[in-house]
Amino acid sequence: GAGVSQSPSNKVTEKGKDVELRCDPISGHTALYWYRQSLGQGLEFLIYFQGNSAPDKSGLPSDRFSAERTGGSVSTLTIQRTQQEDSAVYLCASLKGRETYNEQFFGPGTRLTVL
Amino acid sequence: QQQVKQSPQSLIVQKGGISIINCAYENTAFDYFPWYQQFPGKGPALLIAIRPDVSEKKEGRFTISFNKSAKQFSLHIMDSQPGDSATYFCAASGGGGKLIFGQGTELSVKP
Protein backbone atom coordinates (compact mmCIF):
# COMPACT_ATOMS: atom_id res chain seq x y z
CA GLY A 1 0.00 0.00 0.00
CA ALA A 2 0.95 3.65 -0.22
CA GLY A 3 3.31 5.04 2.35
CA VAL A 4 3.54 8.52 3.80
CA SER A 5 3.87 11.10 1.06
CA GLN A 6 5.13 14.65 1.32
CA SER A 7 5.08 17.56 -1.06
CA PRO A 8 6.90 19.33 -2.43
CA SER A 9 10.05 17.24 -2.35
CA ASN A 10 12.16 20.37 -2.64
CA LYS A 11 11.34 23.98 -1.90
CA VAL A 12 13.57 26.98 -2.44
CA THR A 13 12.33 30.26 -1.07
CA GLU A 14 13.58 33.72 -0.25
CA LYS A 15 14.07 34.95 3.26
CA GLY A 16 10.89 36.48 4.59
CA LYS A 17 8.50 34.47 2.46
CA ASP A 18 5.93 32.04 3.86
CA VAL A 19 6.00 28.35 2.93
CA GLU A 20 3.55 25.47 3.29
CA LEU A 21 4.66 21.86 3.46
CA ARG A 22 2.16 19.04 3.01
CA CYS A 23 1.99 15.55 4.50
CA ASP A 24 -0.36 12.74 3.48
CA PRO A 25 -0.20 10.02 6.14
CA ILE A 26 -0.92 6.36 5.64
CA SER A 27 -4.66 5.81 5.43
CA GLY A 28 -6.11 4.87 8.79
CA HIS A 29 -3.17 6.14 10.83
CA THR A 30 -4.50 8.37 13.58
CA ALA A 31 -1.22 9.85 14.77
CA LEU A 32 0.91 12.25 12.75
CA TYR A 33 4.27 13.80 13.61
CA TRP A 34 6.47 16.50 12.13
CA TYR A 35 10.24 16.45 12.62
CA ARG A 36 13.04 18.65 11.34
CA GLN A 37 16.43 17.31 10.25
CA SER A 38 19.16 19.87 9.87
CA LEU A 39 22.38 19.06 8.01
CA GLY A 40 24.42 16.57 10.01
CA GLN A 41 21.96 16.62 12.89
CA GLY A 42 19.46 14.23 14.32
CA LEU A 43 15.76 14.60 13.97
CA GLU A 44 14.12 17.31 16.05
CA PHE A 45 10.50 16.83 17.11
CA LEU A 46 8.21 19.68 16.10
CA ILE A 47 4.55 18.75 16.62
CA TYR A 48 2.30 15.72 17.16
CA PHE A 49 -1.35 15.13 16.29
CA GLN A 50 -3.37 12.25 17.72
CA GLY A 51 -6.93 11.87 16.49
CA ASN A 52 -9.11 14.75 17.58
CA SER A 53 -7.00 15.62 20.61
CA ALA A 54 -5.26 18.97 20.94
CA PRO A 55 -1.85 18.73 19.25
CA ASP A 56 1.40 18.61 21.19
CA LYS A 57 3.15 21.75 19.94
CA SER A 58 6.01 21.61 22.43
CA GLY A 59 8.71 21.24 19.77
CA LEU A 60 7.82 24.19 17.57
CA PRO A 61 10.89 26.50 17.64
CA SER A 62 9.04 29.80 17.31
CA ASP A 63 5.62 31.29 16.68
CA ARG A 64 6.51 31.50 12.99
CA PHE A 65 5.84 27.76 12.83
CA SER A 66 2.34 26.32 12.86
CA ALA A 67 0.64 23.15 11.68
CA GLU A 68 -2.85 21.92 11.15
CA ARG A 69 -4.42 18.62 10.36
CA THR A 70 -7.68 18.62 8.46
CA GLY A 71 -10.21 15.85 8.81
CA GLY A 72 -7.80 13.73 10.77
CA SER A 73 -5.74 13.06 7.66
CA VAL A 74 -3.65 15.53 5.64
CA SER A 75 -1.43 17.91 7.55
CA THR A 76 0.16 21.19 6.55
CA LEU A 77 3.20 22.71 8.25
CA THR A 78 3.42 26.46 7.69
CA ILE A 79 6.52 28.54 8.26
CA GLN A 80 5.95 32.28 8.16
CA ARG A 81 8.63 34.86 7.39
CA THR A 82 11.22 32.18 6.69
CA GLN A 83 14.78 32.64 7.93
CA GLN A 84 17.97 31.02 6.68
CA GLU A 85 18.19 28.90 9.82
CA ASP A 86 14.89 27.28 8.80
CA SER A 87 16.74 25.50 5.98
CA ALA A 88 16.42 21.77 6.71
CA VAL A 89 14.63 18.60 5.69
CA TYR A 90 11.15 18.47 7.18
CA LEU A 91 9.94 14.94 7.80
CA CYS A 92 6.45 13.73 8.49
CA ALA A 93 5.60 10.40 10.11
CA SER A 94 2.38 8.58 10.87
CA LEU A 95 1.51 5.88 13.35
CA LYS A 96 -1.39 3.47 13.62
CA GLY A 97 -3.45 3.67 16.75
CA ARG A 98 -2.51 5.33 20.01
CA GLU A 99 0.28 3.00 21.10
CA THR A 100 3.59 4.83 21.30
CA TYR A 101 5.39 1.54 20.75
CA ASN A 102 3.98 1.10 17.27
CA GLU A 103 6.23 1.92 14.36
CA GLN A 104 6.33 5.47 13.06
CA PHE A 105 6.38 5.42 9.25
CA PHE A 106 8.30 8.33 7.75
CA GLY A 107 7.79 10.11 4.48
CA PRO A 108 10.73 11.06 2.23
CA GLY A 109 10.77 14.60 3.52
CA THR A 110 10.69 18.10 2.05
CA ARG A 111 14.06 19.77 1.64
CA LEU A 112 13.60 23.48 2.37
CA THR A 113 16.25 25.97 1.32
CA VAL A 114 15.90 29.57 2.41
CA LEU A 115 18.10 31.95 0.42
CA GLN B 1 16.95 15.45 30.58
CA GLN B 2 15.38 15.04 27.18
CA GLN B 3 18.65 14.40 25.36
CA VAL B 4 19.80 11.19 23.76
CA LYS B 5 23.53 11.15 23.08
CA GLN B 6 24.84 8.94 20.27
CA SER B 7 28.34 7.90 19.33
CA PRO B 8 30.35 7.62 17.21
CA GLN B 9 29.37 10.27 14.68
CA SER B 10 30.84 8.16 11.87
CA LEU B 11 32.04 4.60 11.60
CA ILE B 12 33.96 2.67 8.98
CA VAL B 13 33.84 -1.12 9.13
CA GLN B 14 35.16 -3.81 6.84
CA LYS B 15 32.71 -6.20 5.22
CA GLY B 16 32.01 -9.06 7.61
CA GLY B 17 32.94 -7.05 10.66
CA ILE B 18 30.83 -5.94 13.60
CA SER B 19 29.42 -2.42 13.72
CA ILE B 20 28.65 -1.04 17.17
CA ILE B 21 26.79 2.21 17.84
CA ASN B 22 26.13 3.47 21.33
CA CYS B 23 23.49 5.70 22.87
CA ALA B 24 22.93 7.13 26.32
CA TYR B 25 19.89 8.80 27.81
CA GLU B 26 19.07 10.68 31.00
CA ASN B 27 15.31 10.58 31.37
CA THR B 28 14.32 7.49 33.36
CA ALA B 29 10.74 7.89 32.11
CA PHE B 30 11.79 6.73 28.66
CA ASP B 31 10.39 3.26 28.03
CA TYR B 32 10.76 2.64 24.32
CA PHE B 33 14.05 2.63 22.43
CA PRO B 34 13.92 2.20 18.64
CA TRP B 35 16.72 2.33 16.10
CA TYR B 36 16.07 3.87 12.69
CA GLN B 37 18.04 3.40 9.47
CA GLN B 38 18.15 6.17 6.88
CA PHE B 39 19.48 5.98 3.33
CA PRO B 40 20.32 9.20 1.43
CA GLY B 41 17.23 10.96 0.13
CA LYS B 42 14.88 8.72 2.08
CA GLY B 43 13.01 9.02 5.33
CA PRO B 44 14.17 6.96 8.31
CA ALA B 45 12.78 3.43 8.63
CA LEU B 46 12.42 1.41 11.80
CA LEU B 47 15.13 -1.21 12.12
CA ILE B 48 14.63 -2.71 15.56
CA ALA B 49 13.25 -1.59 18.91
CA ILE B 50 13.41 -2.61 22.57
CA ARG B 51 11.47 -2.03 25.77
CA PRO B 52 13.39 -1.79 29.07
CA ASP B 53 11.96 -5.03 30.45
CA VAL B 54 14.55 -7.00 28.45
CA SER B 55 18.32 -6.60 28.18
CA GLU B 56 18.74 -7.77 24.62
CA LYS B 57 16.76 -8.15 21.44
CA LYS B 58 17.99 -9.80 18.27
CA GLU B 59 16.54 -9.69 14.78
CA GLY B 60 18.71 -11.35 12.17
CA ARG B 61 22.09 -9.63 12.10
CA PHE B 62 20.86 -6.74 14.26
CA THR B 63 20.96 -6.79 18.06
CA ILE B 64 20.05 -4.17 20.65
CA SER B 65 21.76 -4.42 24.01
CA PHE B 66 20.09 -2.47 26.80
CA ASN B 67 21.58 -1.53 30.18
CA LYS B 68 18.87 0.07 32.29
CA SER B 69 21.06 0.88 35.28
CA ALA B 70 23.63 2.65 33.11
CA LYS B 71 20.92 4.25 30.96
CA GLN B 72 22.68 3.07 27.83
CA PHE B 73 21.75 1.03 24.81
CA SER B 74 23.63 -0.05 21.73
CA LEU B 75 23.11 -1.45 18.26
CA HIS B 76 25.30 -4.28 17.04
CA ILE B 77 25.35 -5.19 13.36
CA MET B 78 26.95 -8.57 12.84
CA ASP B 79 28.56 -9.59 9.54
CA SER B 80 28.25 -6.01 8.28
CA GLN B 81 27.57 -5.68 4.55
CA PRO B 82 28.08 -2.79 2.10
CA GLY B 83 24.27 -2.57 1.85
CA ASP B 84 24.20 -1.66 5.54
CA SER B 85 25.96 1.61 4.71
CA ALA B 86 23.50 4.25 5.93
CA THR B 87 22.89 6.67 8.77
CA TYR B 88 21.61 5.11 11.97
CA PHE B 89 19.63 6.96 14.61
CA CYS B 90 18.81 5.80 18.09
CA ALA B 91 15.74 7.27 19.73
CA ALA B 92 13.78 7.19 22.94
CA SER B 93 10.21 7.82 23.92
CA GLY B 94 8.43 8.16 27.22
CA GLY B 95 4.88 8.23 26.04
CA GLY B 96 2.97 10.93 24.21
CA GLY B 97 4.35 9.62 20.98
CA LYS B 98 7.22 11.94 20.26
CA LEU B 99 10.61 10.39 19.70
CA ILE B 100 13.79 12.01 20.97
CA PHE B 101 16.53 11.17 18.48
CA GLY B 102 20.27 10.88 18.83
CA GLN B 103 22.52 12.84 16.49
CA GLY B 104 23.02 9.93 14.09
CA THR B 105 25.92 7.71 13.04
CA GLU B 106 27.04 7.53 9.45
CA LEU B 107 28.11 3.93 8.83
CA SER B 108 30.27 2.97 5.87
CA VAL B 109 30.96 -0.72 5.24
CA LYS B 110 33.95 -1.24 2.96
CA PRO B 111 33.98 -4.24 0.59
Image (spheres, rainbow, N blue to C red):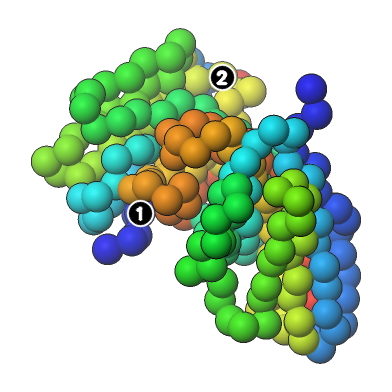
Quadrant of image for the N terminus of chain B? bottom left
Label 2 amino acid?
A: Gln
Q: Percent from the top left, x then y, of residue B22?
A: 33, 41
Residue at horizontal 51%, vertical 27%?
A: B47
Residue in the foreground of this view, choosing between B105 and B14: B105
Mark 1 nearby-residue class (10 Å; few <14, some 14–19, many ≥20): some
Q: Secondary structure at mark 2?
A: loop
Label 1 amino acid?
A: Val
Q: Chain of mark 2?
A: B
Specify whether A31 is left or right of A99.
Answer: right
- Tag in front: 2 or 1: 1
| Badge 2 and badge 1 in a common chain | yes
Specify whether A22 is left or right of B4.
Answer: right
User: In the rendered image, is residue B38 in sight?
Assistant: no
Q: Are marks 2 and 1 in contact (CB under 8 Å)?
A: no
Quadrant of image for the C terminus of chain B? top right
Residue at horizontal 29%, vertical 40%?
A: B31
Residue in the foreground of this view, choosing between A60 and B100: A60
User: In the rendered image, is residue A76 in sight?
Assistant: yes
Residue A19, relative to residue B89: is it above or below?
Answer: below
Residue farthest to the top? B60
Specify whether B89 is left or right of A25.
Answer: left
Residue at horizontal 56%, vertical 49%?
A: A50
Question: Cα distance, mark 2 to mark 1?
Answer: 27 Å
Specify whether A89 is left or right of A49.
Answer: right
Image disc number at residue B69: none
- Residue position for label 2: B81
Point out the tag, 2 or 1, that comes first from the N-terminus. Answer: 1
- Residue position for label 1: B4
